[in-house]
Amino acid sequence: MNNTIVLPDRNPTIDVVRGVAILGTLWINIWLFTNIHGLYGALISNADQPLGERILTSLSQGKFLALLSLIFGVGLSLQLGSARRKAVRWPGRYRTRMLLLFADGLINYLLIAEFDVLMGYTITGWVVSYLLLTRPRTQTALIIAFGLVHTIFISLLAWAASTFSEPAGELATPYAHGNFFDLVLFRLDNLGIFRSEPVLIFALSLALFLAGAKLNDAGVFQPEAGKLRSRLMIIGAIAAPIDLTLGISGNTSAILVQRYLTAPLVSLGILAGIIWLCLRFGTPQLLQKVGKTALSCYLLQNLLAGALFYGWGLGLVNHIQSWRVPATMLGYVVVMTAVVLFAHFWLSRFSIGPVEWAWKKLAKPRKK
């Protein structure tokens, strides 16, 4: 019996979108692994990026983070629907899932990579699980309200960044030469700066989670929702050139606007485009498998990239700075290939990923 058969109530296109989002986040995160000062250097240093790096990072900057948020909202909608069909109290056991997600995020943050999204998603998912119990019109109003709050806040932040510039001094970080525990302590010492993004985008995350849930309720994954997908692709197509221009500029304020304002709009078009391609040409099995083992693959890709580039692993970050752009892209291909092969071979033997299996065991209610 083949364990990889998709269950009838599982939409394979959702797994494909989730797989694209996971591998897309690696595209931007890999640049942090090949930065000799890691995320800290990317946040603190005011050094100019080479044009090639600006172009490549602009292609993914913020877009797959937003896509991941949208698909998380889709998952919330599906779980709420399942709970209602089974007449199970909501959020009920979903709160246990959020606690497990927070634990995964904490492990990822401390031991693997400080640019973790899981802990932020825990808080957002917990809040949105209750907001989904409100009326549809209320949810629409909340999306607009959260979006406006986020837009005003990021606009003010971008303005502040344009008026304040302080040259960074000599950086001392453990990424290139420190051992594994040096990095753990460094993450603990810099908890505030490393955990600032989930706070900055909390309103955006709420809006995207709710938007993903509403799009799923509107049938965006269904063949008959062609008009809805067309509107989303138009939004993405209008935002894309603006987004790319902002990213290529290399200006800090422009990148803030790109990552947190235009990129989410582009992600709507990406979502609709992936669905259209899957409906037209079928679902790519490899991407579907990555999406089905998304949490395992997310943790694995960060672990592999750290093992390749950080000092506690092969330490390649010390040897590639003179040819960083091609080395980073090569690193992306290597890690991505390893993750895809892992998902493929794991699901040829088992029905779910290893972290997903642990979740299932821990979240399973105990018999009295």
Image: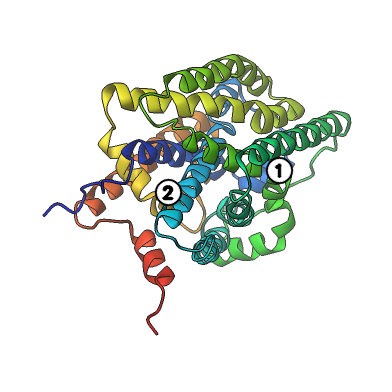
| Residue behind mark 2 | 301
The C terminus: image quadrant:
bottom left
Q: Secondary structure at mark 1?
A: helix
The alpha-carbon separation of the residues under discs 1 and 2 comes to 28 Å
Q: Secondary structure at mark 2?
A: helix
Q: Position of residue 338 (x, y in %)?
A: 32, 45
Along the line of sight, which residue is nearer the eye, 289 or 113? 289
With 153 as the anchor, is 270 left or right in this view? left
Residue type at numbered disc 2? Gln
* Residue at x-position 32% and y-position 45%: 10
Q: Is residue 129 at all visible to an observer of this figure?
A: yes
Q: Are marks 1 and 2 in contact (CB under 8 Å)?
A: no
Q: Position of residue 167 (x, y in %)?
A: 82, 37
| Residue behind mark 1 | 203
Along the line of sight, which residue is nearer the eye, 365 or 60? 365
Front: mark 1 or 2: 1
Q: Is residue 190 at all visible to an observer of this figure?
A: no
Looking at the image, tell me whether mark 1 or mark 2 is earlier in sequence order.
Answer: 1
With 324 as the anchor, is 161 left or right in this view? right
Residue at the right extreme, as displayed: 163
